[in-house]
């Protein structure tokens, strides 16, 4: 559905996208996961023909984004990071506006508007002005708007940014459902790893303008192997003080990898099956240090996508929130004053 | 592209959609309508009556008997309303950009020219509605209309509004933040108003001022409306006024469309 070829975007000296190559298949939910500033939004904007790439190109639904931008626009839907519907208009009016802009034929217009409103669960609020909608409802209206012309692809840029946890879960439910009902290719950007994990068939990690790994969430996590054990020690001299601890643990064949974190004073051990392997490891640590009550606390878990990202980049996916603007002219003005 | 009935209908639908949105928002933002009607009334009744009492008739050379100062400035006040609402309407796209609405329109398969014209029609509609309210109030200060003068005044208002909405849209398309809005008020809106001869006759001006009034398109609208409404011989013949206004529509409209085409989407 989408083939990205060697895409580069530079702003003066800043390289936002650095030779991105990527393939997105038909009817999959593809997630671009990465920290803020990784280039996710820029990539979406380029694919939606809102900005031009510095070099390289992409084929969206069979059309080259640099040569046939108008064809690309007709075949895609896009939901921006901040809600962009007019809050003075009702939900219905916003959809009518966009159905006209996308040239939806008169015969199908009304039926399609009702369909997408139903799909995002806003039928009962169709005649309310958007300024009376909650944050989650606004986002859902944006999705309905993006679907109004039956696009082949829909881009969702941070669809749950700034939503509270319960609205986020409702949003996930709708996204999941639309992927099934509409037979559409869905590309979403997010920096919430649970979101990507829950929704996406495949994930592309993006960092500093580069795609660093592409695979299904489960494959990515499996690549780390088994489970992760974190052990904190009482030893005042730090984890390095235990001679040969790393080598000692590595001699067990169920241990895939050992990381000594001097700063936090803990040991991270990647193992096959934590519930079985943990007692052996604790015993080994105790036997090997002069104080046989050395283990302070133990934690174990399955690897998350954050662990995968950590493995590739050495950094966490940071979280940063921003509030979307709301209200009419006066509220807009007040909001603007705060920025 | 093949041109058929369907394509035309779709293109007109896009234009209609952009216009309709502007119109509905205008109707719903009541505070805007009230505020923009009240200011011209202040000018008409406070400045009109206040200055009228000192300037007096026939203190201003050109005034003929039977027309007081308030009536004399009435066409100017109509044009003031058009100047303010048109330029403000145009530069209002800064808000559209700020709140991403513009982005959502620009990502749709709609040409920039269509967006521009739809917006301009929106500006013309709002200006005309506000002017119509003022024209009705004109009856209270003794203005008489004929069917011909009504048609002529409407055409003049629409031409001026098209030109100045284009100007506002052009300025708005270059501005990133609302800080520039104040500059538009000081350096565009008030000069257009004061130089238009809305408040004084143009016959005996010092030459530097006279030249400045000549480059203001609103001057020609004030002159022509005064001619139609009060039967005063204007500074220019009616056809010249209409001609200059039409020219400013073409020039400012073209500049606006070109500015829209080069405007960044994000």
Image: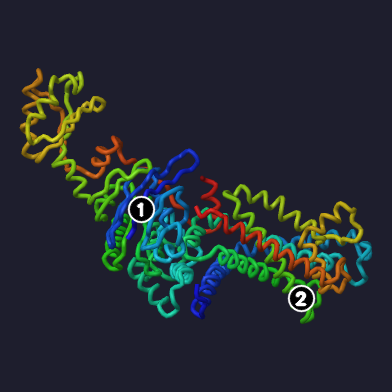
Q: Secondary structure at mark 1?
A: strand
Residue B152: mark in rendering? 2
Query: Residue A112, located in which quarter of the rendered image?
Result: bottom left
In x, y percent, where is residue A113?
40, 72
In x, y percent, where is residue A28?
27, 59
Question: Is residue B85 visible in the rendered structure shown here?
Answer: no
Chain letter of the residue carrying label 1: A
Q: Count neighbours of disc 2 (C-alpha within 10 A) and say few if under 14, some if 14 to 19, many if 20 or more.
A: some
Q: Secondary structure at mark 2?
A: helix
Relative vertical location of residue A323 with respect to residue A59 in this rendering, above or below: above
In x, y percent, where is residue A134?
40, 59
User: Residue at point 21% right, 46% down?
Assistant: A220
Q: Which residue is mark 1?
A: A4
Between residue A252 and residue A47, name the one nearer to us.
A47
User: Residue at point 79% right, 67% down?
Assistant: B75
User: Residue at point 17% right, 43% down?
Assistant: A302
Report the Cα–Cα distance between label 2 and label 1: 58 Å
Relative vertical location of residue B27 with respect to residue B212 in this rendering, above or below: below
Chain letter of the residue carrying label 2: B
Judged left or right of residue B144, residue A293 is left
Query: Residue B211, located in which quarter of the rendered image?
Result: bottom right
Q: Count neighbours of disc 1 (C-alpha within 10 A) and say few if under 14, some if 14 to 19, many if 20 or more.
A: many
Between residue B33 and residue B237, name the one nearer to us.
B237
Judged left or right of residue A267, residue B50 is right
User: Residue at point 50% right, 62% down?
Assistant: B105
In x, y percent, where is residue B189?
71, 56
Query: Residue A60, located in which quarter of the rendered image?
Result: bottom left
């Amino acid at each position: 559905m989408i083939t990205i070829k060697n895409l580069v975007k530079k702003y003066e000296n800043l390289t936002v996208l650095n030779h991105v190559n990527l393939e997105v298949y038909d009817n999959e939910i593809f997630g671009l996961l990465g920290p803020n500033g990784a280039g996710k939004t820029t990539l979406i904007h380029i694919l939606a023909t809102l900005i031009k790439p510095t070099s390289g190109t992409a084929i969206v639904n069979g059309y080259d984004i640099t040569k046939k931008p108008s064809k690309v626009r007709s075949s895609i839907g896009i939901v921006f990071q901040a809600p962009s519907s007019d809050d003075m208009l009702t939900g219905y009016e916003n959809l009518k506006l966009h159905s006209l802009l996308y040239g939806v034929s008169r015969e199908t217009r009304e039926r399609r508007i009702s369909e997408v409103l139903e799909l995002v669960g806003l039928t009962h609020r169709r005649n309310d002005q958007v300024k009376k909608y909650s944050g989650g409802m606004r986002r859902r209206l944006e999705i309905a708007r993006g679907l109004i012309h039956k696009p082949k692809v829909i881009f969702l840029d941070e669809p749950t940014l700034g939503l509270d946890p319960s609205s986020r879960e409702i949003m996930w439910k709708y996204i999941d459902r639309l992927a099934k009902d509409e037979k559409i290719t869905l590309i979403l950007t997010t920096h919430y790893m649970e979101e990507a994990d829950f929704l996406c068939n495949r994930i592309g990690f993006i960092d500093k303008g580069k795609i660093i790994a592409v695979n299904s969430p489960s494959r990515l996590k499996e690549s780390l192997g088994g489970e992760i054990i974190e052990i904190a020690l009482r030893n005042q001299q730090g984890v390095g003080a235990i001679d040969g601890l790393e080598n000692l643990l590595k001699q067990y064949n169920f241990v895939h990898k050992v990381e000594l974190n001097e700063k936090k004073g803990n040991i991270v051990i990647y193992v096959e099956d934590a519930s079985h392997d943990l007692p052996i490891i604790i015993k080994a640590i105790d036997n090997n240090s002069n104080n046989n009550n050395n283990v302070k606390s133990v934690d174990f878990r399955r690897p998350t996508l954050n662990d995968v990202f950590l493995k590739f980049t050495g950094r966490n996916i940071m979280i940063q929130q921003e509030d979307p603007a709301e209200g009419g002219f006066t509220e807009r003005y007040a909001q603007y004053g705060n920025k | 592209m093949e041109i058929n009935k369907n394509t035309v209908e779709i293109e007109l639908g896009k234009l209609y959609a952009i216009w309709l949105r502007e119109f509905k928002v205008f109707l719903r933002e009541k505070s805007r309508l009230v505020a923009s009607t009240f200011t011209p009334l202040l000018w008409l009744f406070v400045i009109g009556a206040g200055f009228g009492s000192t300037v007096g008739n026939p203190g201003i050379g050109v005034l003929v008997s039977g027309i007081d100062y308030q009536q004399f400035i009435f066409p100017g006040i109509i044009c003031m309303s058009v100047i303010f609402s048109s330029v403000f309407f145009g530069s209002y796209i800064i808000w559209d950009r700020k709140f991403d609405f513009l982005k959502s329109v620009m990502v749709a398969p709609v040409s920039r020219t269509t967006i521009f014209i739809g917006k301009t029609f929106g500006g013309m509609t709002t200006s005309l509605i506000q002017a119509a309210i003022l024209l009705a109030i004109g009856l209270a200060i003794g203005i008489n209309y004929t069917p011909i003068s009504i048609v002529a005044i409407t055409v003049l208002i629409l031409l001026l509004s098209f030109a100045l909405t284009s100007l506002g849209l052009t300025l708005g398309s270059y501005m990133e933040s609302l800080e520039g809005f104040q500059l538009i008020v000081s350096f565009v809106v008030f000069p257009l108003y004061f130089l238009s001869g809305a408040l004084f006759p143009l016959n005996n001006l010092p030459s530097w001022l006279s030249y400045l009034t000549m480059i203001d398109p609103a001057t020609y609208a004030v002159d022509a409306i005064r001619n139609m409404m009060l039967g005063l011989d204007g500074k220019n013949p009616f056809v010249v006024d209409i001609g200059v206004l039409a020219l400013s529509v073409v020039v400012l409209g073209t500049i606006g469309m070109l500015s829209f085409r080069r405007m960044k989407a994000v």
